[in-house]
Image (spheres, rainbow, N blue to C red):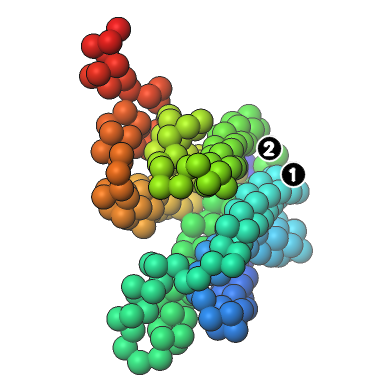
């Protein structure tokens, strides 16, 4: 039975941290030049892509891990990360500062940009490193691919589909002037109030399954990743904060009453619909 290469993995953790943090200063420089810090949102996906590529190269150079699993986890992570980065960059093109960053930086003690560097960019780099642990562990895991890895690919694909389709549906909805001021409640958005967050949830649990395919050690060292992402998406900066901002929108209460908060479910019928047969 092959043993997980803890020494090589520890070295790889350092390289992965370097990759994650290298993306952030470059993004910070772009943000300062543009005068808006919302560009950091696009760096989230780019950071994961950088970690996946650097980890795969370092693991292969050390002669560790299975080449098939390394290639698989790199492709899954890079495809997801680049799609997300491109979507966020396209959505924010020509826009001003994100209200979240405006509110945060309004309370900054001293230089706003340096405060943003500490509280946004470096923190996000640390999160990229932590959340990418399944990607890192999978690259060092011994043994060939098994059915568990392909189960992870299926879960990842479901997640990517929810993110991509949900984002495209919302973009088309917002592009129609007739929908100005209305809530998006069609397509995937009629099954869950957050198809993009649910998709992200599936992506990281799918990548965790690929890491589990590399053995118990890889699973144990990386389980923190999907747990942290689940918390962030549902109880942290994702669903909870977004719904707090949406609570006063006309029609939100009715939409929330008939639509699942996170996991996709058929829309619930209102009392009026039920009474009408």
The label on residue 145 is 2
**Residue 36 percent location from the top left of the image:** 52, 76
Quadrant of the frame with the C terminus: top left
- The percent position of residue 96, horizontal first and vertical second, equals 50, 71
Compared with 40, 206 (above or below) is above
Query: Up-down: is 63 above or below 31?
Result: above
Q: Quadrant of residue 272?
A: top left
Regarding residue 235, the answer to whether it shows in the image is no
What's the residue at 30%, 44% (across, down)? 250
Decide which of tag 2 and tag 1 comes sooner along the chain: 1
**For the N terminus, which image quadrant?**
top right
Instruction: Work out which residue is located at the far front of the displayed protein and give it.
Output: 178
Q: Is residue 188 visible?
A: yes
Q: Residue at label 1?
A: 68
Place of residue 57 in the rendered image (x, y in percent of width and height, measured from the top left):
74, 62
- The residue that appears at 43% across and 29% down in the rendered structure is 191
Q: Residue at x 35, y 52 (%)?
A: 242
Assess disc 2: are there few (<14), some (14-19) or many (≥20) residues with their C-alpha within 10 Å of its C-alpha.
some
């Amino acid at each position: 039975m092959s043993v997980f290469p803890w020494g090589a993995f520890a070295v790889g953790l350092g390289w992965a941290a370097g990759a994650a943090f290298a993306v952030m200063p470059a993004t910070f420089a772009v943000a300062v030049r543009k005068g808006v810090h919302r560009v950091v949102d696009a760096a989230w996906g780019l950071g994961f892509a950088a970690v996946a590529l650097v980890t795969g190269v370092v693991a292969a150079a050390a002669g560790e891990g299975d080449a098939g699993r390394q290639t698989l986890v790199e492709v899954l992570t890079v495809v997801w990360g680049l799609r997300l980065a491109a979507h966020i960059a396209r959505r924010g093109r020509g826009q001003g500062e994100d209200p979240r960053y405006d509110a945060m930086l309004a309370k900054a003690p001293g230089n706003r940009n340096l405060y943003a560097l500490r509280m946004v960019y470096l923190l996000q780099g640390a999160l990229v490193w932590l959340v990418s642990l399944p990607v890192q562990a999978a690259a060092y895991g011994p043994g060939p691919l098994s059915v568990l890895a392909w189960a992870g690919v299926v879960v990842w694909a479901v997640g990517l589909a929810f993110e991509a389709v949900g984002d495209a549906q919302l973009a088309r909805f917002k592009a129609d002037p007739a929908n100005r001021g209305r809530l998006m409640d069609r397509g995937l958005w009629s099954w869950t109030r957050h198809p993009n967050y649910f998709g992200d949830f599936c992506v990281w649990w799918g990548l965790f399954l690929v890491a589990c395919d590399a053995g118990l050690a890889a699973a144990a060292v990386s389980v923190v990743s999907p747990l942290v992402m689940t918390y962030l998406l549902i109880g942290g900066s994702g669903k909870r904060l977004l719904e707090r901002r949406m609570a006063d929108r006309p029609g939100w209460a009715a939409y929330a009453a008939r639509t699942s908060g996170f996991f996709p479910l058929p829309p619930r019928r209102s009392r009026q619909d039920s009474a009408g047969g």
